[in-house]
Image: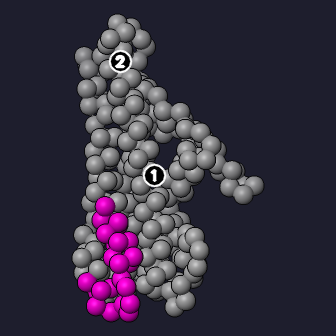
Amino acid sequence: MTSHWDLGALKNKVVATQAGDTKELVDLIYAMGRYQQIFEYHKCLARDAFAAFSTDSGPDQLKFLTHAFGCVSPEEQGTLEHARLVSEANLLACIGITRSAFDSFGELLNRLVLPVPLNGKVYVHTVRDKLPSGELKDSLDSALSASWFTYVSDFSNVSKHRALIGHTPSASYIDDNQGGKVASFTYENRGKPRTHPSYWTKEILEGTIEVWRSLVLCGLALNRHYI
């Protein structure tokens, strides 16, 4: 994906330089690596959910449309429903794990970089605002201001606190596309609602991968700052 974030080097530096018990910090660093593994797992499953229905024109496209319009037996219809479920479940997991990883990264910055660590529940935006000027803050600013980060964050909040967003098999002759499609939704952001358009699942997955790459870039900046 992006240049490798050397979590082992970060852990070794923490153990060598931090006073007192470093278990919580080491566990937090370990968690970042686990987030990466879980993200990769769900990314591949989401990507391949509709693999049985090729996006190429011809018989496979006709097969998708036949299932999408219910022109098959109940047993065959289950194939498309299963693909939809795999797509939705793993896209939700990719988005959720990505958003959680950012707040865990914020806690890591809180403990390792802020001169006076914040108390209580720490969010990545709060930590970003307290960071000293420099490459690390610039990297995090860039990550958090990206349009796809806003989408991922809003999607995660709506899915956790309100309702699941519509996710259905769809096909389009206009752009010769087919697969999962996620409905438009609105997130009530402190009295300033943000409305996001409908996207194909693969578009959202590509956007979420971009967000994950930006987190890795922030991790590389953290290593350069701290080690």
Q: Nearer the viewer, residue 187 or 96?
A: 96
Q: Which residue is mark 1?
A: 96
- Image quadrant assignment for residue 202: top left
- The residues colored magenta run 12-34
Q: Tell me which secondary structure the magenta stretch mostly adopts.
A: helix
* Residue 210 placement: quadrant: bottom left
Looking at the image, tell me whether mark 2 or mark 1 is earlier in sequence order.
2
- Quadrant housing the N terminus: bottom left
x and y, in percent, of residue 185 in the image: 60, 41
Q: According to the image, label 2 marks what residue?
A: 78
What is the C-alpha distance between the residues marked 2 and 1?
A: 27 Å
Q: Which mark is residue 50?
A: none
Determine whether the residue tagged by mark 2 lies in a helix, strand or loop: helix
What's under tag 2, amino acid-wise?
Answer: Gly
Q: Where's residue 143, x and y in %?
A: 46, 67
Residue, far right:
191
- Count of numbered labels shown in the rendering: 2
Identity of the residue drawn at 42% across and 26% down? 169
What amino acid type is highlighted by mark number 1?
Gly
Query: Where's the C terminus, which quadrant?
Result: bottom left
The answer to whether residue 124 is seen in the rendering is: yes
Residue 182 on image: x %, y %: 49, 36
Q: Is residue 154 left or right of residue 77?
A: right
Which image quadrant for residue 47?
Answer: top left
Residue 31 falls within the magenta-colored stretch: yes
